[in-house]
Amino acid sequence: MMAQIFGRKYIRAFVSGFFVAVPVTVTFLDRVACVAKVEGISMQPSLNPGGRYESDVVLLNRWSMRSYEVQRGDIVSLASPKNPEQKIIKRVIGLEGDIVKTIGHKNQYVRIPKGHIWIEGDHRGHSFDSNAFGPVSLGLLHAHATHILWPPSRWQKLNPLLPQERKPVLSDKD
């Protein structure tokens, strides 16, 4: 009899804890942060320097995207403009108002319109990015990649980095 009462209390506590923990976890992952495995070579050497056989796992800060505040050099996750079901990860090269020199885009120079950014992969020529589809709406942003979590040998904070040759030709924000 005592075991039955203890068993029911245990099950009731587990079920009530489960129904609290799941919504809290889902809300956290939806609003605050999540982790993602980076696949492909488009962000080499910053991410996946080992090539196709080794994938970095990054921490994605979703909270910082609430106000769409990004800066040049940030690595961001976003919905692909060509396939909204797919998430891509790229570096922010230009902000609204900037004029950027493109690499293989139909126009050699592009002014980034209001509410848009210019993104590129670090591995030029091996990245499907703004050079293929143009400026990207800020509304497609998902998260800001802040740290490499895996493999342990690559644990590090991802600081904004913009190569000198990719700086905007003209910027309204400087």
Image: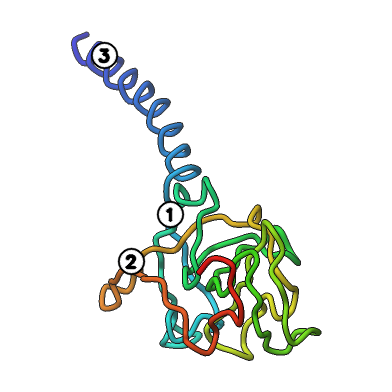
Q: Position of residue 78 (x, y in %)?
A: 60, 61
Kind of residue indicated by mark 3: Gln
- Residue at 27% across, 21% down: 10
Q: Position of residue 44 (x, y in %)?
A: 48, 85
Dot 3: what SS? helix
- Kindly report which numbered mark, 1 or 3, lies closer to the viewer in this rendering: 1
- Residue at 44% across, 76% down: 55
Q: Residues within 10 Å of mark 3 (few under 14, many from 20)?
A: few
Decide: is 11 above or below 113.
above
The mark that comes first in sequence, 1 or 3, is 3
Check residue 61 in the rendering and tell me which mark sits there, or answer none.
1
- Residue at 32% across, 74% down: 151
Dot 1: what SS? strand
Q: What residue sits right under mark 3 in the picture?
A: 4
Q: What residue sits right under mark 2 in the picture?
A: 149
Decide: is 167 above or below 24.
below
Q: Quadrant of the N terminus?
A: top left
Q: Are marks 3 and 2 in contact (CB under 8 Å)?
A: no
Observer-nearest residue: 49 or 121?
121
- Kindly report which numbered mark, 3 or 2, lies closer to the viewer in this rendering: 2
Total tally of numbered discs in the picture: 3
Decide: is 113 above or below 49.
above
Which residue of the protein is positioned furthest toward the top in this rendering? 1
